[in-house]
């Protein structure tokens, strides 16, 4: 890789559902640092044990140089206000630009302002000309496992999901957590990353992810071992790639091309999932 491209390449570590002291917490930090993914995308559940504090869980990350630019609220939280203050979040929902990537971050835990969030999201998606747009919130818009049905946050999804489907062509991917699995789905052509098994997996049954108003396809799923994902955004190639990393093996086990410059496509298309 040439020096100019290395400077423009953005690498993000996706670590949802990691707000807990766990035997995998330190290995996860080491794995992220080894693969140069110190910019974090954290799609919620940032404090499980309310006898702990955000500082006791996340200060070790800060001391090792991790960046907390993209953080969403989840249902495991001390309070919205305290969490927002610790992570420097300007609001429950907000936009954050990192290089050429725009992140639109929502609070799926708050159904009371779901229509307000949906209206804001529509305005943002209508206006943006960013080459890479990622929508981040905690609860998946469809059921991923038998542990969490999507109707847990029905009002939020019924307000927001139509906006996602309307502007799907502008969305590089949706990034969520909640289910303690890591994987990639597609909802009416929108890539949906579930990033919840970097620290702790949960025994579960995998279910049919279909919902009434969209077609959902499962592309990749890791649910029986700690697995985190690294998102690479490469403006020079106009590509975004997702790498699945096995924590125990400390190696990339598969890679997915999320977005591709149409001018670089060939008649023989690349496989979506590369191993």
Image (tube, helix red, strand yellow):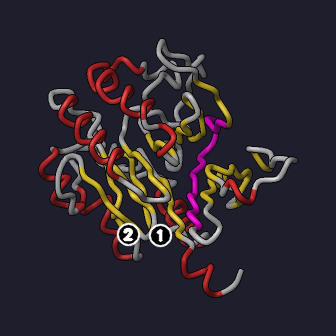
Residue reaching furthest to the right: 268
Vertical comparison of 245 with 183: above or below: below
In which quadrant of the rendered image does the N terminus lie? Answer: bottom right
The residue identified by callout 1 is 38
Q: CA distance from mark 2 to mark 1?
A: 6 Å
Residue 135 location (% of width, % of height) = 40, 45
Vertical comparison of 39 with 175: above or below: below
Q: Judge whether residue 57 is colored magenta.
A: no
The residue identified by callout 2 is 67
N-term mark: 2 or 1: 1
Q: Secondary structure at mark 1?
A: loop
Q: Which residues are magenta?
A: 220-234
Residue 43 location (% of width, % of height) = 38, 46
Write the residue at 59% across / 46% down.
226
Residue 270 location (% of width, % of height) = 80, 49
Write the residue at 31% across / 60% down.
96
Residues 251 and 254: in front is 254
Vertical comparison of 182 with 111: above or below: below
- Do tag 2 and tag 1 residues touch (Cβ < 8 Å)? yes
Write the residue at 48% across / 37% down.
168
The main secondary structure of the magenta stretch is: strand
* Image quadrant where residue 177 sits: top left
Residue 126 location (% of width, % of height) = 34, 45
Q: Secondary structure at mark 2?
A: strand
Q: Judge whether residue 228 is colored magenta.
A: yes
Residues 120 and 196: in front is 120
Residue reaching furthest to the top: 212
Q: How many other residues sit within 10 Å of disc 1, few (<14), some (14-19) or many (≥20)?
A: many
62 left or right of 220? Answer: left
Q: How many other residues sit within 10 Å of disc 2, few (<14), some (14-19) or many (≥20)?
A: some
């Amino acid at each position: 890789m040439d020096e100019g491209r290395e400077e423009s390449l953005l690498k993000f570590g996706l670590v949802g559902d990691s707000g807990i002291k766990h035997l995998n917490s330190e290995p996860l930090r080491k794995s992220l640092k080894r693969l140069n993914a110190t910019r974090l995308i954290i799609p919620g559940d940032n404090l499980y044990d309310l006898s702990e504090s955000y500082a006791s869980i996340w200060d070790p990350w800060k001391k090792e140089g991790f960046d907390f630019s993209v953080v969403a609220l989840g249902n495991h939280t001390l309070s919205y206000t305290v969490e927002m203050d610790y992570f420097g979040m300007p609001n429950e929902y907000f936009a954050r630009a990192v290089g050429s990537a725009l992140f639109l971050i929502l609070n799926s835990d708050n159904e009371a302002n779901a229509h307000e969030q949906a209206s804001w999201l529509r305005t943002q998606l209508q206006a943006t000309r960013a080459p890479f747009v990622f929508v981040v919130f905690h609860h998946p818009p469809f059921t991923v496992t038998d542990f969490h049905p999507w109707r847990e946050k029905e009002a939020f999804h019924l307000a927001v999901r139509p906006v996602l489907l309307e502007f799907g062509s502008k969305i590089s991917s949706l990034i969520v957590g909640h289910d303690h699995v890591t994987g990639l789905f597609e909802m009416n052509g929108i890539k949906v990353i579930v990033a919840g098994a970097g620290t702790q997996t949960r025994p579960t049954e995998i279910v049919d992810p279909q919902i009434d108003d969209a077609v959902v396809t499962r592309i990749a799923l890791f649910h029986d071992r700690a697995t985190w994902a690294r998102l690479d955004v490469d403006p020079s190639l106009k590509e975004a790639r997702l790498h699945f990393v096995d924590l125990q093996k400390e190696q990339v086990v598969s890679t997915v091309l999320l977005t591709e410059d149409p001018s670089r496509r060939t008649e023989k298309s690349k496989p979506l999932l590369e191993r």
